[in-house]
Image (spheres, rainbow, N blue to C red):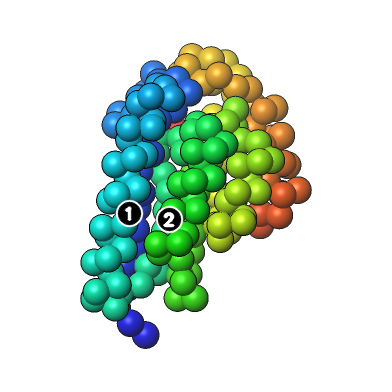
Amino acid sequence: SPPSVGLYIGIPFCPSRCQYCSFPSNVYTQRGSEQYLDALHKEVDAVHVILRGKSWNAESIYIGGGTPTSLSSEQFDDLLSHVSRAFLSQDTREFTVECGRPDTIDPIKLDAILRHGGRRISINPQSMKDETLETIGRSHSASDIEKAFELAARAGFRDINADLIA
C-alpha cells in the first residue's frame, strides 16, 4: 500500500473555557471562527496538494479541539465537506470527529459527520458527577451526557469513545 499519514485538524473553539483546560482554545465567536476556518481551508488545500504530489494517503483523520461541534451547523458541515473531499479515500481506515461537550451535539451535526464519511466520534464528559461538572465549568449534566450517547447511537454511530479526567 502507498505511504500514509495520520492527520489531526484542530478546531480551537469551545462554548466556554473549562477551569482545567490547558489546550489552545477560545470561546466560540462567529467572527473569530470564520477567520480561523478561512485560513484552515487554505491549509487543507495546501496539504492536499502536497499529499497528492507524493502519492500519499490519509490513513487516519482526526478532527479535534477544543470542541469542533461548537461551530455553527453550516460551518461544521462545510468543514467536514472540505476535509473529506481533500483527504478521504478507500485507504482511509479511520475518520474521527471529536464532539467533546454533549451540549454541542445535535442530530444535524451527527448526520453531517456520517454523510461526510466520519464513523467514530468522541464524546468527552470528563466526569459523570454533576458537582464536579459544575466545579470545572462545564455547562451540562451527567444526564446530558447519557442523552448525547443515546442520540449518537440512534444516529448510527457504533464507535464512540469518551474522555474522563482523573
The residues bearing labels 1 and 2 have C-alpha atoms spaced at a distance of 7 Å
Residue at the bottom extreme, as displayed: 1
Which residue has dot 1 on it? 44
Q: Going 35% across and 48% down the picture, which residue do you hit?
A: 41
Q: Within 10 Å of the Cα at label 1, are there few (<14), some (14-19), or many (20+) other Cα atoms?
A: some
Q: Is residue 11 placed above or below 22 in the rendered structure?
A: below
Q: Is residue 21 visible?
A: no
Which residue has dot 2 on it? 83
Q: Going 51% across and 41% down the picture, which residue do you hit?
A: 76
Residue at the right extreme, as displayed: 154
Coordinates of residue 79 in the picture (x, y in percent)? 46, 46
Q: Is residue 115 placed above or below 109 in the rendered structure?
A: below
Which of the image's four quarters has the C terminus?
top left
Q: Assess whether mark 2 and mark 1 are in contact (beta carbons under 8 angstroms).
A: yes
Amino acid tagged 2: Val
Q: Going 69% across and 40% down the picture, which residue do you hit?
A: 107
User: In the figure, residue 109 lies in which quadrant?
Assistant: top right
Coordinates of residue 151 in the picture (x, y in percent)? 72, 41
